[in-house]
Each structure stands twice: as structure tokens, then as C-alpha cells.
Image (cartoon, rainbow, N blue to C red):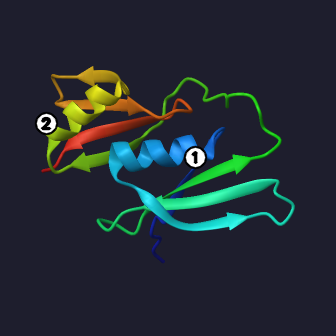
Amino acid sequence: MTFKMCHENYNVLDLNRSLEFYDKALGLKEISRITADDGSFVIVYIGNETTDFQLELTWLRDHTEPYDLGEMEFHLAFYADDYDAAHALHKKMECICFENEAMGIYFIQDPDGYWLEIIPAK
């Protein structure tokens, strides 16, 4: 028996703001969308051509407060083929929240507080 990862879910307060962030910061585009008939939720799957793994962004109409992300001991990681250009973009966007120069990595934070690790491509 084998398993293949297909997506990870992040709940977001402002779907359009999140879609703009992920497009600008990481080049992730909308792949598909599910909208509840009653308008109570929207689920958008985003990704790119480098992998079939997707990020699921879920907006819930009745959730109006920021999500409690606990102690932030989780993250999603991305390889950057041009690490220096990625770092410059994220610095300009002012979304870098932590850098570990000794390890050669850094983290950016999305509009809802989720951390995303940026790693130089091997």
C-alpha cells in the first residue's frame, strides 16, 4: 500500500487577499474552486506546474476572527530555483518573518499568519 500527498488546507479570512499573496509570493494560481450553494464556504485549490501537490484555501462566511494557529510549530516548504531573487521579492513584499542564515533558509508569513519556508533548490 502506498500513499501520495495531494493537498494541504489553510483556512483564510480574506480569500482574494490570500490568492493575491500566493500568486505574487510563490506563483501559485487557482486550479479549481468549490462554492457552497448557500454561500457558506468557498474552497480554492492553488498550485503550479512544478508538482501536482496543491494548497487548499478555505474561506468560511461565518468565521470573522483570525484563526488561532497555536504555537506556529508547522509550515509548508518550497524550493526556490532562484533563491536570491525570491529573497529580494519577499523582502520587497515585507513578508519575511524569520531568517536562518546559518542554514541558508528563511520563512515568509501569509496574510493569515501561516509560515512558509523558502529553501534554495539543490
Expressed as whole percent of the image width and height from the top left, the position of residue 70 reads 61, 26
Q: Which of marks 2 and 1 is in front?
A: 1
Q: What element carries label 1?
A: helix
Q: Are marks 2 and 1 in contact (CB under 8 Å)?
A: no
The residue positioned 49% from the left and 66% from the top of the image is 6
Q: Which residue lies furthest to the bottom in this view?
A: 1
Expressed as whole percent of the image width and height from the top left, the position of residue 77 reads 35, 44
Q: Which of 77 and 26 is in front in this view?
A: 26
The residue positioned 39% from the left and 69% from the top of the image is 52
- Sort mark 2 into few (<14), some (14-19) or many (20+) by Cα contacts within 10 Å: few
Q: Is mark 2 on a helix, strand or loop?
A: helix
Residue on which disc 1 sits = 16
Q: What residue type is labelled 2?
A: Asp
Residue on which disc 2 sits = 84
Quick check: 33 above or below 96? below
Examine the rendering and report whether any part of residue 54 can be seen.
Answer: no
The residue positioned 45% from the left and 42% from the top of the image is 21
Quick check: 79 above or below 7? above
In this image, 64 relative to 10: left or right? right
Q: Which amino acid does label 1 sit on?
A: Asn
The residue positioned 45% from the left and 69% from the top of the image is 4
Q: Which label is found at residue 47? A: none
In this image, 76 relative to 89: left or right? right
Examine the rendering and report whether any part of residue 110 can be seen.
Answer: yes
Expressed as whole percent of the image width and height from the top left, the position of residue 116 reads 39, 38
Expressed as whole percent of the image width and height from the top left, the position of residue 97 reads 37, 22
